[in-house]
Image: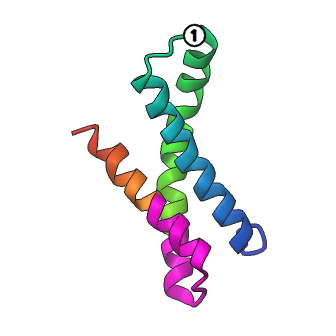
Amino acid sequence: MNKLITRRNLIIANFAIVSYFVLIWLIDFYEIDFVLIGVFRELLTIPFLFAQIIFLVIGVKLLLKNQKDFLIIISVLLLAICSIITIGTFF
């Protein structure tokens, strides 16, 4: 499992998750309403919510362990902010 979660893969996954939720917000903000966008939004939102929490835990563990890379810190920080905003919208 450690070979699959490298620093580079973690950074890419974190930025992809944050980008997905920013894109969802932009689509909602500009009221873009296409059927295909709605289908992908419905299919991908729940897996990205779970991935958001899982990769946040993995990123925090990696930061606490020993690897302090600038991009990892930024990506985990952005993912944490995105998680707080996303989960906060449920309440």
Relative to 84, 49 lies left or right? right
Relative to 87, 60 lies left or right? right
Q: Which colouring convention does the figure follow? A: rainbow
| Residue 16 position in % (x across, y down) | 62, 49
Which residue shows up at 51% across the image and 11% down it?
A: 33
* For residue 87, above or below residue 38: below
Tell whether position 74 is magenta: yes
* For residue 90, above or below residue 4: above
Residue, disc 1: 34
Give the total number of marks visible in the rendering.
1
Quarter holding the N terminus?
Answer: bottom right
Q: Which residues are magenta?
A: 59-78
Which residue shows up at 41% across the image and 51% down it?
A: 82
Crowding at mark 1 (Cα within 10 Å: few <14, some 14-19, many 20+): few
Which residue shows up at 72% across the image and 75% down it?
A: 2
| Residue 32 position in % (x across, y down) | 50, 16
For the residue labelled by badge 1, is the local secondary structure a helix, a strand or a loop? loop
Instruction: Report if residue 1 is visible in the image.
Output: no
Which residue in the rendered view is the most extreme toward the left?
Answer: 91
**For the residue marked with disc 1, what is the amino acid?**
Phe
Which residue in the rendered view is the most extreme toward the front?
Answer: 30
Front residue of 85 and 30:
30
| Residue 53 position in % (x across, y down) | 46, 55
Q: Look at the magenta stretch and give its main secondary structure.
A: helix
Relative to 12, 55 lies left or right? left
Quarter holding the C terminus?
Answer: top left
Front residue of 36 and 64:
36
Which residue shows up at 56% across the image and 40% down it?
A: 20
* For residue 51, above or below residue 41: below
- In which quadrant of the rendered view does residue 90 lie? top left
Instruction: Report if residue 54 is visible in the image.
Output: yes
| Residue 3 position in % (x across, y down) | 78, 73
